[in-house]
Image (spheres, grey):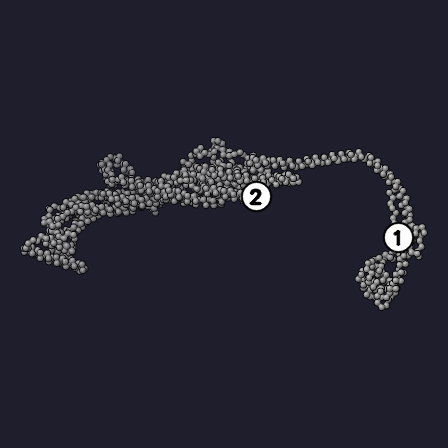
Amino acid sequence: MAANPPPPPCSAQPSSSNTGSPATGLAPPIEPAAASASSSLSHPVPLESLQARHASYPASSPHPDHGELFLQEIEAVDDYWGPTFRAIYESDASQAFLERLEQRTHEHDAEIEKMCNHHYQGFISSVRDLLGVRSDAETLKAEVGAIDNDIRNSGQGVAVKARDLVKARRVERNIAATIESLSLCLPVLQMFTKLNKQMSEKRFHPALKTLEQLEHTYLPRIAKYRFSKQMQASIPRLREGIKEASISELKDFLEKIREYSPRIGELAMRKTALKMNLDHTLAKDHGAQSGIPSNPFGGDIDDDEDDQLNGTRLSLSPDKSPQAAQDFVDFGPVYRGLHIYTKLGERDKFQSYYQKQRLQQAKLTQQPPPNMHESIEGYSAFFYGIIGFFACEDHVLNTGNGLITRGYLDELWKGMSTGIKETLQQHSAYCTESGFILKIKNLMLLFSRTLQSYGFDDDQMSSLLQELRDHYTEVLMLKWVAKFSAIFKVDNYHPIEVNNPDEYSSVTNNFPLTSPSLEEAPFPRQFPFSAMVPKVYNEVKEFILSCVQFSQDLHLSFEEIDQAVRKATNTLLTPTLSGCLSNLIRTSNLSLLQLIQIDINTYHLEETNVHLEKYISDITGANLENSSKSRLQARAIFKDIRVEAEEEIHCKLISKMDEFIELASYDWLMSEPEGTSSSWLTDLIAFLNSVFLSFTNLPVKLAQKTCMSALQYLAKCIQAMLLDESVKALSHGFIQQLDLDVVQCEQFAASEPVTGLEEGVLLLCFSDLRQLLDLFVSWDWSNYLADYGNPTSKYIRVKPQHALILLDKLKEAEKKNMFGIMNKKDRDKKRLVDIVYKQLKNLTLQQTNGV
């Protein structure tokens, strides 16, 4: 194909003055110099320069060069000629400018013509060449079309093969892409299938591991596939399912551990008992009785990592008994749950849930079984549950990877120990049997030692054991009150009498008595005390043994045990035994002789103090010399009891004497005495004689004191009868009869009813009465009145008021017997009586006035 010829370089028509070629009708080419001149005017001039230039032109005097300048400005500015034209008209040079403009137009026409003439010949040659090329282009076009047809015909088969090849290559690429996609998707699908299988088999820990690999390793490789998004969306649901399943497993574990805690606690306390030899009854194998399973676990986990998490779980053979908490319960749910929540970044949540649930179980553990105080099995179940709880927690502490801490367990025990102490205080207060309290003490001690083996302090239990010991002592006191009361009830309070050596040995073997005289005496022999003495002594020893039993295994020193036993023994002697003896002494049905025997018994019980001191030291292993600060108070106690007994003896003796004195029946106005002492006095002296004979085993001073007080009381009573205000009249015959009775008393006093008294001491008891009776029997008023106030007087003990009362009663009796005229003797006697009466009255007034 031939290209069209280019247009001529200039289309301007030549003016009539220009000459050109007739053939072409084109103007001649422009000269180069003219072209360069015109091109120099094509640059635009800034508007600001034109305005400044116009301002410099004078308006009144146009200049010939101004027209040239205006033309240059017009040629220089393309679009804004207003200022130039205004300057032309303002300078009145418009005509000159038009002329100048016409001239410049002709100049440019000439330049254009010269330039066209210069290039015209070359343009004509080019047009001719192009016309020649047109024919060649048409020929070439025909040849190219023929070649194109040939190529088209020959390329149709190639195109078919090429399309087949492209299709095959496309299939090949699709197959390669499919293989690549399958190679990426198959591991993901396999992992997802494995995950579902692990979930269905409840192997949640490896499932979590698989889920993490699936989420972070495999699913990112197939993120462009739509099904991966569905799998990605199911991951949170699967993760929550694993969390819920692990919590469900933990709940099952908590339920099972609640069930097995008592058995775990029993095993722990049994091991402690065997180790420390505290209570052998707990060391028996109760596995079959307790229903301990031989293999309490489910199936094993296949993954190695899961085996590590359950590393504490043991597979027990049928013939192997459980030895620890992990032998009863599989702790795998705890470890798996902790690991799962740790992997999921929620460890604190799992830890809080576990501790909260265990705290609730701890509160349930503190609740005692119903009627726990009624049987030792109730206490055992209570202790087993608590020990089992802390044994499991200790195992979790050691193997739980920080699930709980030592401080948490110590704080938990601190909070529980107060409630446990209060529960035990409440229930042990109901115990009234010493043997049962000992069993409780052994269980508490074993409980405390077992807790210590797990690292918990036993301050509360030590304090509770001290309180239990006090309660145990109180229960023993009540028990021994009954024992002492039974002993006192069956005793006849007569000296023990033995008829042969065997009977003698049976007494001396039970009571420390050293009496050479008794050992040399022939049978039957009589001990100075009654049967209550050896029985009470042996019961006190039995009490000491019971106190020592409680102190066993408490890890106390010999001195601490010794002091505790001595303190308890003093408590037994002081309020218990002394109280029982005091009640016994006040018993109304005791005879005087029985009271005397009780008093004698206290002397022998007092002597047992030394033997009890030695017995306590021997049984506790303490040095007797180091126990001086806590000596037994038996001596002081029995002394106090003896004082009370002696007072009661005195009261009883006086009461018995009153019974005899009440039998006295005198004829106050008898004319003549009976000639012998009164019968009531004879009986009384016989009674006193028998009583004083029983004083042989009493201390001499006590016997002397009792005898003297009895005779003083008898003299006082006889004198009271003589001076009784209710008796208004007395005869001389009554005074003589009373004198005979006093003589009988003086004879009894002179017979020394008790040994050791100075001669005549007992006679002094009747000296006041004797002088008063001698005064009236002998009627020796002259000596009495003359020697009154003299220390050597024969009637120094006769008080004027007593003599006045008795004389007044005699006068009253004489008035009743006076029936006729008195003779001189009677009148003299009456006159003497009146004189004596008057003088006695004056003496009485003098004593009353203090003269």
For the C terminus, which image quadrant?
bottom left
Which corner quadrant of the image does residue 70 belong to? bottom right
Q: Position of residue 386 (x, y in %)?
A: 45, 41
Label 2 sits on a secondary structure element that is loop
Work out whether residue 357 can be spotted. Answer: yes
Q: Residue 758, percent across and down?
A: 18, 48
Dot placed on the residue nearer the N-terminal end, 2 or 1: 1
SS of the residue under disc 1: loop
Which circle marks residue 11 in the picture?
Answer: 1
Image marks 2 and 1: residues in contact by CB distance under 8 Å: no
Residue 46 drawn above or below residue 680: below
Label tally: 2
Cα distance in 3D space between marks 2 and 1? 90 Å
Q: Position of residue 645 (x, y in %)?
A: 25, 46
Three-letter amino acid code of the residue under disc 1: Ser
Which of 366/62 is in front?
A: 62
Q: Tell me the amino acid under the disc marked 2.
A: Gly
Q: Is residue 88 left or right of residue 240?
A: right
> Residue placed farthest to the bottom in the image?
60
Please tell me which residue lies in front, 722 or 816. 816
Task: Please state which of the two labelled residues, at mark 2 or mark 1, is closer to the viewer.
Answer: 1
Which residue carries the number 2 mark?
345
**Residue drawn at point x = 16 percent, y = 56 percent:** 801
